[in-house]
Amino acid sequence: MKKKFRMPTAYTILFLLLILVAAATWFIPAGAYDRAGEDETPVAGTYQPVEQQPQGPGDVVLASFQGFYDAVDVALFILMVGGFLGVVMKTGAIDAGVGNIIRILNGKEILLIPVLMIMFSLGGTSFGMWEETMAFYPLLIPVFAAAGYDPLVGIAVVLLGSGAGVLASTVNPFATGIASGFAGVSLGDGLMVRLVMLLVFDAAAIWYVTAYARKVRNNPDKSLVAGFSQKFTAQKGGDVPTLTSRRKLVLALFTVVFLIMIYAVIPFDEIGVPIPTLGWWFPELSGLFLVGGVAIGLAYGLGEADTAGAFVAGAADLTGVGFIIGISRGITVLMDGGQITDTVLYWGERALEGAGSVAFILLVYLIYIPLSVLIPSSSGLATLSVPILAPLGQFAGIGGDLIVTAFQSASGLVNIVTPTAAVVMGGLALGDVPYDRWVRFVWKLILIFFLLTIAFLAVSAIL
């Protein structure tokens, strides 16, 4: 009997990408730009070939370890979130809260989709909420599953909500802010165009997810993960724990932890809001979830042993996601080791020479798409590329603000679907959804975003 093809796991896909990138270092010429300043900003027009540094089998193996070292802060954050959620789930408060929400909504759970997607989008567009969303997948996927939807709906609410916001970043300091600085423009330049893009992309994403959710709830057989994911299923009314006063206390503490996380990472000083900025990042956030998990366990009365056991078990559940994050970082390690990153950027520089304004900005956008796959860090990509592409735009009559918009739009679009994005692969792993099912689900929306972005860029170049 002929076996049906099954998509490889996220680990296999990422290791295959590592092998492909290593192979590319044997054929793509090595090269480097001169660097300037503390940020080692590439200087346009200074590219020179350097000695070839091909990466071999040993480098492929070590790249994932080096990537894990580079991403250890994110990986530890994921483990602390897992431990925190392990304690919360041990109390039964989430199941009780979900059951209560479903009873209150009484068949109108679909209203959660636009509300939550708008919230995630606001986080994405304002402070680049992306890696931080990993904490929400294990929380919301069961919520939507309990309401009769499939895991793809919960994943899409988080990933496409924040993804649409990041794609149309307005004042995101980690993408728009860094890129604007290198382009020599202010954060407010091009803001109106990006605001309109945000509204249009949000509306498209909400419509897309809602339409799929309705279809799946009306006919579960139409789910793209039917027969694949058995991890999350609708809860039966009798299986839902009672929402006691202690569980209400747990939910209150749970909410406080997430509110502190959101407040602590927003750079209010950089976006002009007169509110104290904490400037926390993954080490501080990891500490927050550790303290939060212990506090919730003790407040509920689990005791020291059960609290520690639940925390360790919860962290263990997300160990695989931590590995995915490390492996995905290995791709950048191999490119830098083979010194082909600057070569790929130089090819883009050469392709843009002599183009008219509309053709130039569309070519910039198209060049940024493969660059975003190879360099998934938006801040890293901005540092590498904008100092080279922005001066070229002046010769084509294109302002630096439009270069920034093209950069962040391409980076944001790729982040939604690329297997090199740890958030994508991690979110899918948490939902037990194969990567090919996500691609089948999202490709039409990706095409819509792509065509809309081209239209926005072309009209902006003409005006």
Image (spheres, rainbow, N blue to C red):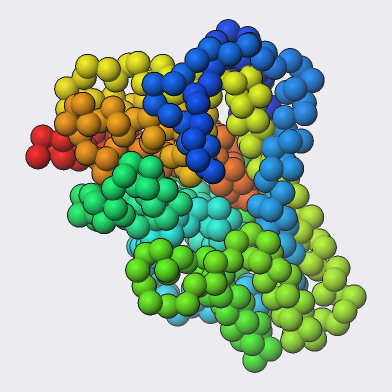
Q: Is residue 439 left or right of residue 55?
A: left
Write the residue at 71% across / 68% down. Answer: 287
Residue at image coords 55%, 58%: 132
Residue found farthest to the top: 27
Specify whether residue 442 is in view: no
Looking at the picture, tell me which residue is in the foreground, 46 or 453: 46
The image quarter in which residue 293 lies:
bottom right
Indicate left or right for 302 with 136 as reference: right
Q: Nearer the viewer, residue 263 or 180?
A: 180
Residue sitting at x 86%, y 82%: 303
Residue situated furthest left in the rendering: 463
Percent of width and height locating residue 204: 28, 49
Q: Is residue 170 visible?
A: yes
Whether residue 138 sits left or right of residue 174 in the image: it is right
On screen, 9 above or below 309? above
- 288 relative to 75, above or below: below
